[in-house]
Amino acid sequence: MFGNPLYPTYQTFLALGIAAIIAAVLMPLWIRILRFEGIGQQVRADGPQRHLVKQGTPTMGGVIILISVVLTCILMARPSLELIAVIGATVATGALGLLDDATSVAHGRSLGLTPHAKMIGLTLICFAFCFVAVNFCGVLPEVRFPGGLTIDLSVLMTAFEIGDRAYYIPWLYMIFTWLLIAGFSNAVNLTDGLDGLAGGTSMIAMLIMAAIAFLHGDPNLSIFSASCAGACIGFLWFNCYPASIFMGDTGSLALGAAFACMGIVTNTEISSLIIGGLFIVETLSVMIQVVSFKLTGKRVFLMAPIHHHFEKLGWAETKVVIRFWIVAAAFGALGFAIFFQLG
């Protein structure tokens, strides 16, 4: 609706600004509604003691993030199969997160859906997205590495026909995309533990993905990524320390899925692993902590995920967040450089 398609760079930046404005305008109303309904964050009892004051802070800010992204894409982008697939997976994952948040609030505890139920939902979303991406969006079931190495993941393939059309299920690639989407969804969710941390790092990652989509030749996906970054900017105005609202699983799961889906539809899965390196570090810190404690009874970190480790060392929350933003930007720059190596 807005912008001239002859100037995709202009459209991308305009989408960033529109999404930020929509989020910034709607968020205060959403905060008032949540406070009126008494819908607030349930803080971990075993977390840092300084976080106990956050108990009851409105959550589910991810609802406004998703609304901002969808509205911006409707206004700015042209419908395409790739865009619809990515938005569909993002909204579906956000809906799963919303159910998780609602369950947590209803039960009055920091845990929502069981890990088993959440993983079933993520698996269904991942498999559906992969099927659409391969059969309708032209995504090749392969993984490309720097230096020209390409691994074909279509060697284990099931083909079937419906009418006059053949459809394919590349099982190995489907498992790979499941690891990517479910992994990043949970990784961003783990990162969402400090005011402004998940929002800021997701903004950085999605800005890089917007540039990759632009260079990939898909302005619609560039607009989508820019919209995600812009929505994070609007959200951060209210989520910076001390936060007035949290994104909840609604936002963190959705942003993780959006990031992973962008890596898949642009065939830059390896680059996305580097760009989202901070999210992977957060996840690895939890895995290392659990394995170490089960095997030796000792903890490697004072507390996991790793951002809490630095809090326990005495770092101020804002200091941890800003330094993690810097690390995320460094990972993003490295991943963007690898994208150029992939050609």
Image (cartoon, helix red, strand yellow):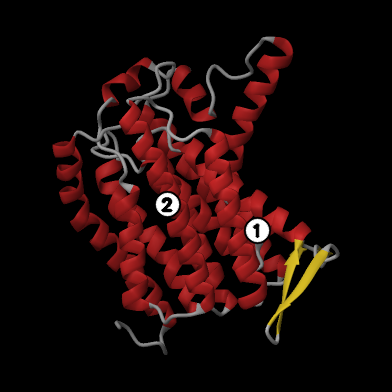
Within the image, what quadrant is residue 140 found in?
Answer: bottom right
Within the image, what quadrant is residue 169 found in?
Answer: bottom right
Within the image, what quadrant is residue 116 found in?
Answer: top right
Q: Is residue 213 visible?
A: yes
Q: Quadrant of the C terminus?
A: bottom right
Residue toward you, 260 or 123: 123
**Residue 87: horizontal and vertical position, in percent?**
46, 65
Q: Which amino acid does label 1 sit on?
A: Ser
Structural crowding at the residue carrying mark 2, measured as other residues with C-alpha within 10 Å and reported as few (<14), some (14–19) or many (≥20)? many
Residue under the point 20% across and 48% down: 30
Residue under the point 64% across and 34% down: 284
Q: Mark 1 points at which residue?
A: 271
* Residue farthest along the top direction in this orientation: 297
Residue 142 as seen in the image, left or right of residue 86 = right
Q: Quadrant of the N terminus?
A: bottom left
Residue toward you, 162 or 154: 162
Q: What residue type is labelled 2?
A: Gly
Q: Can residue 263 be seen in this view?
A: no
Marks 2 & 1, CB-CB < 8 Å contact: no
**Residue 247: horizontal and vertical position, in percent?**
35, 43
Label 2 vs label 1: CA separation? Answer: 24 Å
* Residue farthest along the front direction in this orientation: 163
* Residue farthest along the right direction in this orientation: 155
Q: Name the residue under label 2.
A: 94
Structural crowding at the residue carrying mark 1, measured as other residues with C-alpha within 10 Å and reported as few (<14), some (14–19) or many (≥20)? many
Q: Which of marks 2 and 1 is nearer the N terminus?
A: 2
Residue toward you, 243 or 84: 84
